[in-house]
Image (tube, rainbow, N blue to C red):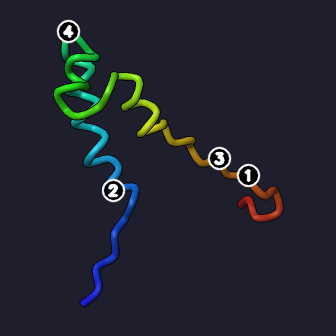
Amino acid sequence: MMLSINPDYNFGKVYGPIKTLINKSSNKNQAANLIGFSSAGTVVDLFPKKKKKSYKINKNNKK
């Protein structure tokens, strides 16, 4: 049986808790070091914000 892996779902499961831990700490760089990153900026570089999809509305298909 093959399992499909949704990268968006897995991304959220990993990024959310890491971001919360670092943002709630008083020393962000020390918290990032404890998790395994060199600095808090490294976390942002590793998990960049995703762009929201923009959809173009076709006037002919609009009801």
Q: Amino acid at mark 1?
A: Lys
Q: Nearer the viewer, mark 1 or mark 2?
A: 2
Give how far across and how far down residue 49 sits, in percent. 48, 36
Q: Secondary structure at mark 4?
A: loop
The reply to whether the C-beta atoms of the residues labelled 1 and 3 are less than 8 Å apart is: yes
The outermost residue toward the right is 60
Instruction: Say which residue label 3 marks.
Output: 54
| Residue in the foreground of this view, choosing between 58 and 46 | 46
Disc 2 from disc 4: Cα separation: 29 Å
**Gap in angstroms between the C-alphas marked 1 and 3:** 7 Å
> Does residue 9 appear left or right of residue 31 in this picture?
right
Residue marked by disc 2: 9
Amino acid at pointer 3? Ser
Q: Name the residue tied to disc 1.
A: 56
What residue is shown at x 28% (from left), y 38% (from top)?
16
Q: Is residue 28 above or below residue 36?
A: above
Where residue 7 sits: x, y (%)?
A: 39, 60
- Look at discs 2 and 4 and give the one toward the viewer: 4
Q: How many marks?
A: 4
- In this view, the residue in front, 9 or 34, is 34
Tell me which numbered mark, 1 or 4, is placed earlier along the sequence.
4
Position in image of residue 14 (x %, y %): 27, 46
Is 52 situated above or below 41?
A: below
**Element carrying mark 3:** loop
Q: Residues within 10 Å of mark 4 (few under 14, many from 20)?
A: few
Above or below for 47 versus 25:
below
Q: Nearer the viewer, mark 1 or mark 4?
A: 4
The quarter in which the C terminus is drawn is bottom right
Residue drawn at x 23%, y 34% is 36
Q: Within 10 angstroms of label 1, few (less than 14), some, or many (20 or more) residues?
A: few
- Tell which circle, 3 or 4, labels the residue nearer the N-terminal end: 4
The residue indicated by pointer 4 is: 26
